[in-house]
Amino acid sequence: MKPYFKIMSIFLLLFTSYNYGQKKETKKINTSKLHFKNFESNWQSLSTQNIPEWYKDAKFGIYAHLGPYTVPAYENEWYPRKMYSYAKDKYQRVKDHHWKKYGSMKNFGYKDFIPLFTCKNFNADEWADIYQRAGAKFAGPVAEHHDGFSMWDSKINRWNAKEMGPKRDIVGELVIAIRKRNMKVITSFHHSYNASGLYFTKQDSLDTGNPEYADLYGQLNPQLSYKIWFEKIKEVVNNYKPDQIWFDFELKDIPDAYKLKMASYYYNKEKEWEKDVIITRKNNDLPEGVAVLDVERGKQEKTTPKLWQTDDALSTYSWSWVEGIKLKPEHEFIHELIDIVSKNGILLLNASPKSDGTIPDDQKKIFYAIGDFLKANGEGIYATRPWVIHGEGPNLYDQGRGLAEDMGNTSKEAKIFTSKDLRFTQSKDGKTLYVHALGWPKGKLIIKSMGTESKYLNKDIKAVRLLASNQKILWNQSKSGLEINTKNTKPTGKHAFTWAVTLK
């Protein structure tokens, strides 16, 4: 063989070997998707869903009730149900108000509030800025409330915010603004009640009985209603890829076949999207393990082994903005957040915007106060885990307060916490404990659970520091507890204060 051909043969052999190696490389398995499961449409399979780490770490989220029910701005977001009640009952005040201001329900029904629901001043970026400043790690819209009006650009439901009222995709705009600020997205669904009987109806005297509006008022045949219930969720999942789906009560009345279809469809999107998602539910509306429990306006008595969530509102009664709305004071929410996190919980807090799409200043003030606390003390809240016990002091259990409409009156007086009420959290690696005092201790803070003979501590204390402070902290550990001298220490912020206790 001539030298020229010998060289060319060697070259071709090397090229073929290299090209073969390249082809083999392209056939490698995409390991990034191995983390995600394939879920079957049965409860056993779906109950193996893992709770995302981002959700465990988030601790605090915000959503908002905005819909046509904000136009009458009377009593609360249950206006569309109450206005149609034809019996002499607890809804009489709303019926009288409607007759006086708008006339009969046949001539002016709930549908007629939609053209008045303009959201002319709605600004998704402004909302997202408020949420971010408040310290929320996830946020989003009420996608659809009980009333049957979709707040997104829907092809499934003609009664939607893109085609009517605002003439804007409220959900879509919010999702973009929230993700732009690196927050996870939650979309809440309350429409199970629409499919199972929210509206009272009479064929001849109420517009709810008019077949022309049956799709808004939930008067379709049950199988069609349930199909539409699922298709609405599917549409939001496909269009906006929410990180969390939250369900209100009455999900229990949706047949299992549709709930299985919904949960498997959503959870199987994890692999396609390459991200972890989660469902939250009320009561036992979905089986254990399929979704995280949400406790409306309530709390757990002690730390629970399973993660849970509370949804609460700034107001003591209404979830939507109404004339004369009464807000709880800012310190309640800071104390509530700490208490919930110490018991392995997450707080989802509701904003109540006006029908023009603005969040009032008095609500912003509360959100900013929470944000100020988290800016100073977030190390002891975000990405923490419960300690062996959740706290010590005279008030270890606060049931929460507010009225959960038609779910039992849970309205109570607020608990008054002091510096003697302590809550505990710890870092994921267990090397740092956090002591949250729900008031500033004057002179001395004694943590009995952290003494030298404590059954809860398995390591010695190395250092103590006050979060958001460079002040030198004087402390001493004895049999009676960990004693922190606060006599010459200046408070950082207000309402609650956090010390980091580093273990050896």
Image (cartoon, rainbow, N blue to C red):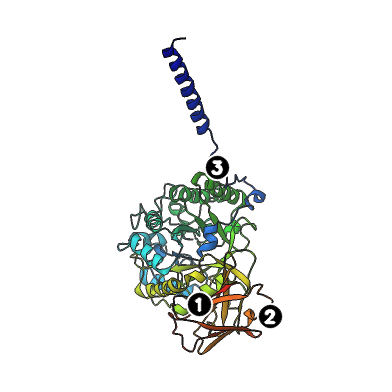
Residue to which mark 3 is pinned:
31
Label 1: which secondary element: strand
Q: In this rendering, is residue 387 above or below 187? A: below
Q: Earlier in the sequence, mark 3 or mark 1?
A: 3
Question: Badges 3 and 1: C-beta atoms under 8 Å apart?
Answer: no
Image coordinates for residue 343, horizontal then vertical, percent: 60, 71
Badge 1: few (under 14), some or many (20 or more) residues near its Cα, within 10 Å? some
Q: Is residue 177 visible?
A: yes
Image coordinates for residue 200, horizontal then vertical, percent: 51, 62
Badge 3: few (under 14), some or many (20 or more) residues near its Cα, within 10 Å? few
Badge 2: few (under 14), some or many (20 or more) residues near its Cα, within 10 Å? some
Residue to which mark 1 is pinned:
465
Label 3: which secondary element: helix
For the residues labelled 3 and 2, the Cα–Cα distance comes to 48 Å
User: What amino acid is at disc 2?
Assistant: Glu
Question: Badges 2 and 1: C-beta atoms under 8 Å apart?
Answer: no
User: What amino acid is at disc 3?
Assistant: Thr
Label 2: which secondary element: loop
For the residues labelled 3 and 1, the Cα–Cα distance comes to 42 Å
Mark in front: 3 vs 2: 2
Q: Nearer the viewer, residue 39 or 76?
A: 39
Q: Quadrant of residue 460?
A: bottom right
Residue to which mark 2 is pinned:
453
Image coordinates for residue 270, horizontal then vertical, percent: 53, 48
**Residue at the location (50% across, 61% down)?**
199
For the residues labelled 2 and 1, the Cα–Cα distance comes to 22 Å
